[in-house]
Amino acid sequence: MRLIEAIRAGPSQQMTHRQRRCYYAGMTGVSATKALTVRDIPTAVLDEISGRAARSGRSLQEYVRGHLVEWASRPEPDDWAAQVRARKAATGGGRLGDLALRDAELP
C-alpha cells in the first residue's frame, strides 16, 4: 500500500508503522513526532491515569498526549504573573472597572 493510498484509506492493520505515523501526524497537523519516556511512575498513579484514559474511551498514550498538549498551551505561573505585572504597568495598574471608567471619560 502506497503512503498516499494509506492516508486516504484511514488507519488499518496493513499500514506500516511509518504510514500510521504519517496518517496520525496529518490528522493532528503535527509534522513530526517525538517520543517521551517517563520512568519510576508509582503503580497507583499509573493505575489511576490508565483508568481515566479507559473511562474517556482513549488509549493511555492518547490520554497523556492530550494532557501534555493542554499543559504546554498554558503559561507557567511565574510567566503568567509577569504578563499580569506588565499589563498592569502598561495600563496604569488600575482595576478593570476603574480602567473602563477612565476610558469612557476620554474625549
Image (tube, rainbow, N blue to C red):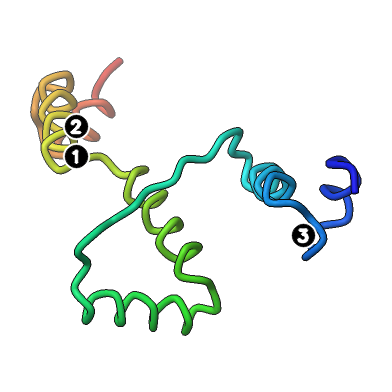
The residue tagged 3 is 11
Residue type beneath disc 3: Pro
Cβ–Cβ under 8 Å for marks 1 and 3: no
| Snapshot quadrant of residue 75 | top left
The secondary structure type at the circle numbered 3 is loop
Identify the residue shown where x is 28% and y is 56%: 38
The secondary structure type at the circle numbered 2 is helix
Q: Nearer the viewer, residue 86 or 77?
A: 77
Picture coordinates of residue 37 (x, y %)?
A: 34, 52
Q: Residues within 10 Å of mark 1 (few under 14, many from 20)?
A: few
Q: CA distance from mark 1 to mark 3?
A: 50 Å
Q: Nearer the viewer, mark 1 or mark 3?
A: 3
The residue tagged 2 is 99
Cβ–Cβ under 8 Å for marks 2 and 1: yes
Side of 48 relative to 94 (left or right): right
Q: Tell which circle, 1 or 3, labels the residue nearer the N-terminal end.
A: 3
For residue 43, the mark is none
Q: CA distance from mark 2 to mark 1?
A: 5 Å
For residue 96, the mark is 1
Picture coordinates of residue 88 (x, y %)?
A: 13, 28
Identify the residue shown where x is 53% and y is 73%: 58
On screen, residue 93 above or below 46 = above
Identify the residue shown where x is 19% and y is 27%: 102
Q: Residues within 10 Å of mark 3 (few under 14, many from 20)?
A: some
Picture coordinates of residue 54 (x, y %)?
A: 48, 81
